[in-house]
Image: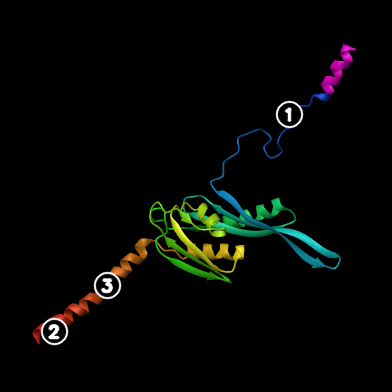
Amino acid sequence: MAEATQQANNKTSRPPRRDARNPQGAPREESPFEEYVISIDRVARVVKGGRRFRFKALVVVGDRKGRVGVGVAKGQDVQLAVGKATDIAKKTMVTIPLENDTIPHDVEVKFSGARVMLRPAAPGTGVIAGGPVRAIIGVTGIRNLLSKSLGSNNKVNIAYATIEAIRQLKPRSQWVGNVNKKTTKAAKPAAASKVEEVKA
C-alpha cells in the first residue's frame, strides 16, 4: 500500500517548467526604452463572407533622455498589434534638444486635422498636457512644458502632430546667434545715419 502511494506521488510530482523564451533561467536584459500604449481600437474590414476584425495599437516609446518615437500597427490580436507598433516606434525615434528640462522655443504644427502647440515653461511648472501629448512628453525626459491641442480629437493625428512638432525643435545655439547677428547688422546702419546727420 505504501509503495503504491509513493509511486502515485512520483507520477503526480512534475519537474519545474522551463520558459521556452528563457530556457536556462538567465536574467533578462532590461530595455532602455519605456513603452506606453496610448490606445487600442478594434477595426473591421468588410469582405465577401462578412467582416474581419483586427486590432490597431498606438504606442509611444522613449528613453527619458530626449529620444521618443510613435508607432501605429494592426494585428490579429492585441499583443501582435502592440509588438508591431513598438518596433515601428523604435525605428522612427526623434531626438529632442533639451534646455533645462524643457524645450528651447515655441512650436506649433498642423498635421491633418490636428494642431498641436508646445511652449517652454519655467522650472517647477510641470507638464501641462493631456491625452496623447502628455503620454508622449512623459517618456521624453521633459519636466516643464505648456501645450495645447487644437482641432481634431483623433489620437493618431495628435500623436503624429506632437512628434512633428518635436522634430522641428532646434537647439538654442543654432538660432540665438543668428538673432544677435541680425540685430547688430540692423544697428550699424542706424549708427552711420546718425554720424551723417551730425556732419551735416
Q: What element carries label 3?
A: helix
Q: Is residue 86 magenta?
A: no
Could you tell me how far apart the alpha carbons at marks 2 and 3 are, in whole angstroms?
21 Å
- Which of the two labelled residues, at mark 3 and mark 1, occupies the earlier sequence position? 1
Q: Position of residue 23 (x, y in %)?
A: 69, 35
Q: Where is residue 184 in the image (x, y as percent from the top left)?
A: 24, 72
Could you tell me how far apart the alpha carbons at marks 2 and 1 are, in whole angstroms?
95 Å
Q: Which numbered marker is on residue 183?
A: 3
Q: Nearer the viewer, residue 122 or 2?
A: 122
Residue neighbourhood size for the residue with mark 3, other residues' Cα within 10 Å, grouped as few (<14), some (14–19), many (≥20): few
Above or below for 187 versus 53: below
Q: Nearer the viewer, residue 126 or 30?
A: 126
Magenta segment range? 1-11
Q: What element carries label 2?
A: helix
Q: Given this view, does label 3 or label 1 mark the residue nearer the observer?
A: 3
Outermost residue, bottom direction? 200
Q: Quadrant of the C terminus?
A: bottom left
Q: Position of residue 89 (x, y in %)?
A: 59, 56
Residue underneath mark 1: 16
- Which of the two labelled residues, at mark 2 and mark 1, occupies the earlier sequence position? 1
Dominant secondary structure of the residues highlighted in magenta in the image: helix
Above or below for 163 versus 126: below
- Which of the two labelled residues, at mark 2 and mark 3, occupies the earlier sequence position? 3
Q: In which quarter of the image is the N terminus?
A: top right
Residue at point 87%, 12% (across, down)? 2
Q: Which numbered marker is on residue 196?
A: 2
Asked which quadrant contains residue 54, the reply is bottom right
The three-letter amino acid code for the residue at tag 1 is Pro
Could you tell me how far apart the alpha carbons at marks 3 and 1 are, in whole angstroms?
74 Å
Whether residue 86 sits left or right of residue 11 in the image: it is: left
